[in-house]
Amino acid sequence: MSTCATASRDLDEPLAGTAATARTWLLLEQPGPWGAKALTSSHLDPEVGSALERAAEGTGVRIALIRRPGRHADCHAPTRHRVYVAHTVPGRTWLRSAVTDGPRRLLDLDFTALGAGDHGGFGTPHTGAPLALVCTNGKRDRCCALLGRPLAAELAAAGEEGAWEITHLGGHRFSPTLLVLPYGYAYGRTGTHAVKEILEAVRTGRVIAEGCRGNSAWERPGQAAELAVRTATGEDGAGVLSVVSTDGAAPRWEVTVAHTDGRRWQVTVEQGISLPPRPESCGAALKSPARMDVVAVRPAP
């Protein structure tokens, strides 16, 4: 059976610069089935889901539903919900958690402040294992269910306490897709062994660039530029590289990446198209999706 993920893998479509963009993630536990637009098509009150979407719009906050891996009974029984909020800008990352029995209370949060990196005292600092969030929403694309759910189940069976299923990370054709918090790096085409290495690196304050789609704190050109600097220099420290400026517009940008030790690099990123055409989602028409190509990495004065 041909899928969008099979086509993307066979055509060796590059991963860098394809991560969803979000400075801050708000993750709400919601067991049970998810529809394609999960915030308004799950057992979460659709009124609350719609209000959360409106509250987050334009703030830099991205909201997603999460659930523990495994079978999910279609049960409407009331439950308490785990909530995580994570800010992913390097040097300012944090991850906090809380439990609520009323998701409507999340509407009291200051979403503009959350997007800017101010948690306002929400919850408590997360001190457990890093979160490994695997997209499994087959209602959006079958690849997420066919490839994502087995990965999430394998991670849970292997004892990864931070393993969760998540509703949407973008880029179905890169399934199985993964978001790792607190640092906010997304990965594609990941297997269990690779995820274990990624999480072990996170525990020691490192970032693995192989298979990485980018840091969600940056726009797509910045994601590609930061990963190119990591590849060129061998730098794997988390929180040490930042995108400090992005000049230009599609199809060409000049991105400045800075290290906390004072070094800087000028990275030229060009927007290309992926050929031959391929489906961006299963069943979709053939298209030539944009890609971020790094054409130069130069030390800056």
Image (cartoon, rainbow, N blue to C red):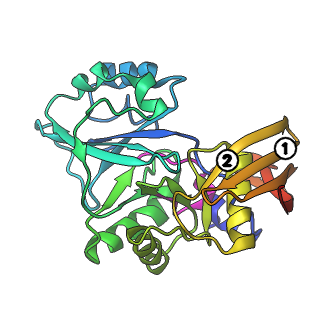
User: Badge 2 is on which residue?
Assistant: 243
Instruction: Give coordinates of residue 271: x percent, y percent.
Output: 85, 48
Specify the amino acid type for callout 2: Val
Classified by dominant secondary structure, the portion drawn in magenta counts as: loop
Q: Is residue 240 left or right of residue 119?
A: right
> Is residue 301 at all visible to an observer of this figure?
yes
Q: Name the residue carrying label 1.
A: 253
User: What is the magenta range?
Assistant: 167-179
- Residue 111's quadrant in the figure? top left
Amino acid bearing label 1: Trp
263 relative to 64, above or below: below
Most foreground residue, 22 or 296? 296
Q: Residue at x 11, y 35 (%)?
A: 78
Q: Nearer the viewer, mark 2 or mark 1?
A: 2
Would you say 45 lies left or right of 49 here? Answer: left
Report which quarter residue 158 is drawn in: bottom left
Q: Residue 130 in the image: x percent, y percent?
A: 35, 62
Mark 1, Cα crowd under 10 Å, few <14 / some 14-19 / many 20+, is many
